[in-house]
Image (spheres, rainbow, N blue to C red):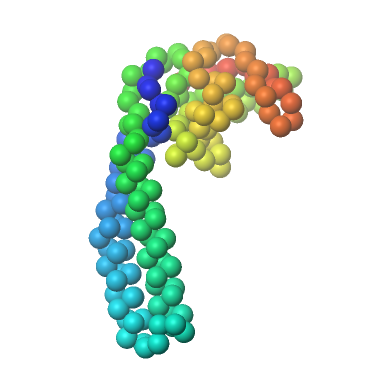
Amino acid sequence: MNDTTNHDVVSKEKFDEMIKELEYLKTVRRTEIAKNLEYARALGDLSENAEYQEARDLQAATEERIKKLEDLVKNTKILTDNKKKDEVSFGSKVSIKKEGSAEVHEYTIVGSEEADMRVKKLSHVSPLGAALMGKKKGDTFTFDTPAGRQTYTIEKVA
């Protein structure tokens, strides 16, 4: 299994997305901000210049995002498809059913950087994601939630 102790794991698509955003911020966005700063400086008194302060804030936020992306790109492992098809791992699509319910929920297991419950992308380090890792179709598992212990059965792993 992938070593994820100090690394987040992302799909190749997410990694490429981060690289693309980083390039955009370093080239296009930095140039736009520099032009905005230059324009705002030309307006005069910097102490009472809202445009200048706004441009400086935007510059700081952009540089912070660039640093975060650079750290992510450097410390992220790209998910490779070396998973066992019948076992829950990164990239797996898992269908689970809560004990006593007929409703089936499907999630995709991803790294924490990609997690988004609105689109059913579940982080491998979340309580549910961690409980699912390594399990197989037909396995029953229990994990703790704020509402108490929940028991689920794995219906499908793809």
Counting from the top left corner in percent of width and height, residue 125 is at 52, 29
Counting from the top left corner in percent of width and height, residue 68 is at 38, 48
Counting from the top left corner in percent of width and height, residue 110 is at 45, 32
Q: Nearer the viewer, residue 36 or 53?
A: 53
Q: Residue at x 34, y 53 (%)?
A: 66
The number of numbered discs placed on residues in the rendered structure image is 0
Q: Is residue 63 above or below residue 8?
A: below
Counting from the top left corner in percent of width and height, residue 48 is at 46, 84
Q: Nearer the viewer, residue 114 or 64?
A: 64
| Extreme-bottom residue of the structure | 44
> Is residue 107 visible to us here?
no
Q: Residue at x 59, y 26 (%)?
A: 128
Q: Residue at x 68, y 19 (%)?
A: 151
Q: Is residue 102 left or right of residue 64?
A: right
Q: Nearer the viewer, residue 60 or 150?
A: 60
| Extreme-front residue of the structure | 47
Q: Is residue 137 left or right of residue 64?
A: right
> Is residue 84 visible to us here?
yes
Q: Is residue 90 above or below residue 41?
A: above
Query: Dividing the image into 4 quarters, which one contains the N terminus?
Result: top left
Q: Is residue 146 above or below residue 153?
A: below
Query: Dividing the image into 4 quarters, which one contains the C terminus?
Result: top left
Q: Residue at x 50, y 32 (%)?
A: 123
Tell me which corner region of the image, top left, top right, bottom left or bottom right, holds residue 43: bottom left
